[in-house]
Image (cartoon, rainbow, N blue to C red):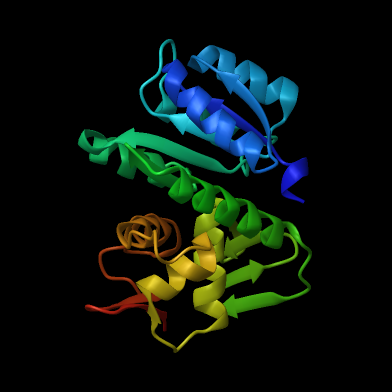
Amino acid sequence: MDNLKKILIVDDEEHIIELIRFNLETNGYQVITANDGNEALKKIREEKPNLVILDLMLPSIDGIEICKILRKDEETEKLPIIMLTAKSEEIDMILGLEIGADDYITKPFSVRELLARIKAVLRRTQEIQEKRESVLKIGDIMIDIEKHEVTKKGKKIDLTLKEFELLRILSEKRGNVLTRNYLLDEIWGYNYFGDTRTVDVHIRHLRRKIEDDDKNPQYIQTIRGIGYKMK
C-alpha cells in the first residue's frame, strides 16, 4: 500500500527536498513539496497528504507554528508529522513532540533511517484508524478505543495520536512494567532507531492531561531505570 501514500516534504533547502524526494519516489511513495510555511499549509489543505516531513526552521511560518495550526484543525489533527531538526534545536524538538509531532529526525540523517521512520509512522497510523470494539476503564478514566475518545469523570480529554496510544497500551497491560524500548517499538514501530526521550516527553505530556497532580501521578507510575506501568 506504500505506493498509494502521498507525502509532503516541507523544507527551504532544495538539496534536502531533492534527496528525500528521490528516495521516497524510488520506494514507491507519491511526493509533493513546499518551500515555506504558507505554501505547506496550502498544499496540506489542497493535496491532503498521508504524512508530512516538516522542517523546523522555515520562512514565513516555522515548523512549530505549522504543527500547532494542524493540531487545532479537526481535519488535520491526526495527520502524521515527522519533524526535521538540527542537533542544536533539541529544545524545539521536545516542544514539537509535546504539541503533537509523531516523530523527529535530526540533520544530517541517513536515508535508511528516514524511510524506517516513515514506514513506522504510517503503519501505526493505519492500525490506529482500524476499528476496535472495546472500552477500557481505569479508575475514573474511560477509554473508548473505537471512538478514539478519552473521558475523565465524564469530561472529554483531548489527546494526540501518540498520547492516546500510550494510554491505551498502558491500560491494556495495566499492572505490567513496560520498558521504554517496548513502548517505542509498539507505538512508534521502530526499535533500533529509537530514542527513549520520545517516550518520556509523551508520558510527561499525558500525565498533565489525565492526572489531578502530574507531579504526584496516581495512574502512570515511573519504574526507575526501566519504564512505566499503569497502576
Q: Quadrant of residue 13?
A: top left
Residue displayed at 50% across by 17% down: 37
> Does residue 155 appear left or right of residue 109 in this picture?
right
Residue displayed at 50% across by 58% down: 163
Q: Quadrant of residue 152?
A: bottom right
Residue displayed at 56% across by 66% down: 153
Q: Residue furthest top?
A: 60
Q: Position of residue 217 (x, y in %)?
A: 32, 71
Question: Can residue 51 be seen in the rendering of this structure?
Answer: no
Rendered-image quadrant of the C terminus: bottom left
Q: Position of residue 130 (x, y in %)?
A: 76, 62
Q: Position of residue 52 (x, y in %)?
A: 57, 35
Residue displayed at 53% across by 63% down: 189
Q: Nearer the viewer, residue 158 or 53?
A: 53
> Does residue 146 appear left or right of residue 71 in this picture?
right
**Is 67 placed above or below 201 here?**
above
> Does residue 150 appear left or right of residue 55 in this picture?
right
Q: Position of residue 180 (x, y in %)?
A: 36, 71
Q: Nearer the viewer, residue 98 or 218?
A: 98
